[in-house]
Amino acid sequence: MLSDALRYTSSYRDTSWVDQHHPGPIVMAGHQPSIFHAGVWFKNFALDRIARQTGGIAVNLVIDNDVAPGCSVRVPSIRPRDIDAVIDGPHREAVPYDEAGGGVPYEQTTVHRRDIFDSFDKRLCEAVAGIVDDPCVTQLWTHAKSAIERCGVAGCALAQARHGLEGELGLQTLEIPFGVICRTTAFAEFVLAILTELPRFHRCYNDSADQYRLYHGIRSTAHPVPNLSRDGDWFEAPLWIYGNDSPERKAAWVRLSDDVLSISDRSGRELRIDIRHSKLAAEQLANLVSPNFKLRPRALVTTMYARLVLSDLFLHGIGGGKYDQLGDEICRGFFAISPPKFMVISATIKLPGWDEADYEKRIRDLTRRLRDIDYQPERFADEATLDESLMKRKTELLSAGLPTLSETGMNAKKDWHDEITRINSQLAMQLEPLRKQTRFELIDAERKNGAQRLMASREHPFCVFPIEYLKTTFQRLLA
């Protein structure tokens, strides 16, 4: 794995710092090759720091077998959303780096429109103008345009661009696409260890998922992962099958018959492996996978392999850490081991200069003010001219108190309520200008609160931040 990672990384950035003879412990993380938010990027800086502190080597897995959701990045913008608008509040705007796409694994996301890809940085800068004037997309996209010339695949280019920028910032990490790892004999051995005992793995997987849902009160059978299915002597495996000629992922199904293991997507693709000798079977499987028959693990098996086989410490984000609580239970049940501990690390990084005013409190105060105008209008006597006789009569009624039913009967109690209501209504009518002003202020506070929530979001992609601001923030967090 280290040799493959070194070979891959050295194709686009310097790796002279790598000590191939004494690499030390392997610290590993992984993420999809997308333009993720700044808190996710922090994990790569932590990866570098931990490897340095432990005398180890940092490796980041590019999880290119996950499905790409699209080919655009949503960024904050204050420019008008249509030509008729004079001014617009902050909103999210989608900036594409290719024409409409997605729906296939990242390693299959070939770029269709180079003109859109090449101009992405310029268009993103225009979109965020007035919010951030020096986004690091300018530095990032210099690397991206070089990378797309090498590979032609958006996922590959985005990952290499980000990693190239990390190199400029001094991070000493290697990277490797998980698709490269999946072509090795070692990975084939791991897969066959599961597939040759798939009925037992099924029980461990499904029972653990059921217990996880029960413990966390999850009703949906699709979360955190759906159970594996069975159809006669075919068992669904925790793997995907796809290829260059048909890039949509399909579930892998496995059947064992007379020492022959059949692996199929049940749509025309099928491999048959003689499993009588495990080492030979692994070599056969590694040789049979091809660009048109790609065998890739699902999420839980991906991190299983990364943690059990490839690394000494694995760094998860929050989501991955939650999922791997389930992965740990499957490991205990199937492999009969206590899986190694993992680290969960994330950060919330907000755009510089965002408004910290407490608009939530302002909204509560103004909402209360509108209610008081209707039900306690006398409180605003110093802000408007109110009928003194009406306020005096209300004070008398409140001082006397609500008539009791036993003393006066039902009508007197109702008359008291009706008179209070009538007085409040008449006084409130005299406060109409104040009501209009308060409503205007409430609308303005709600608009600003919405803008603040957007601007203070942790989900903004890292490429909209100034690079020096991110470096300083990350260094402070790591310290």
Image (tube, rainbow, N blue to C red):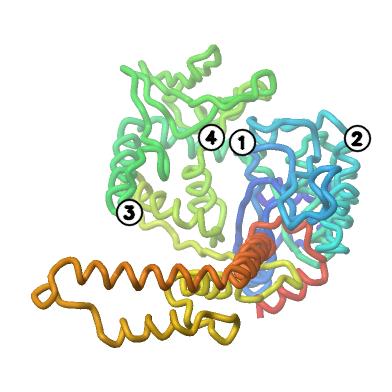
Q: Position of residue 117 (x, y in %)?
A: 85, 39
Residues under labels 3 and 2: Cα distance?
Answer: 48 Å
Q: Is residue 24 visible?
A: no
Q: Amino acid at mark 4?
A: Ala
Q: Of circles 1 and 3, which is in front? A: 3
Q: Residue at x 79, y 46 (%)?
A: 81
Q: Of circles 1 and 4, which is in front? A: 1
Q: Of circles 1 and 2, which is in front? A: 2
Numbered disc 2: secondary structure: helix
Badge 2: residue crowd in 10 Å (few <14, some 14–19, many ≥20)? few
Which image quadrant for residue 393?
Answer: bottom left
- Dot placed on the residue nearer the N-terminal end, 3 or 4: 4
- Dot placed on the residue nearer the N-terminal end, 4 or 2: 2
Residues under labels 4 and 2: Cα distance?
Answer: 40 Å
Badge 1: residue crowd in 10 Å (few <14, some 14–19, many ≥20)? some
Q: Which residue is mark 3?
A: 216
Q: Which residue is mark 2?
A: 115
Residues under labels 1 and 4: Cα distance?
Answer: 22 Å
Q: Of circles 4 and 2, which is in front? A: 2
Q: Position of residue 232 (x, y in %)?
A: 31, 17
- Dot placed on the residue nearer the N-terminal end, 1 or 2: 1
Q: Amino acid at mark 2?
A: Asp
Q: Which residue is mark 1?
A: 67
- Dot placed on the residue nearer the N-terminal end, 1 or 4: 1
26 horizontally vs 92: left or right: left
Question: Of residues 395 and 268, which is closer to you in this image?
Answer: 395
Q: Are marks 3 and 4 in contact (CB under 8 Å)?
A: no
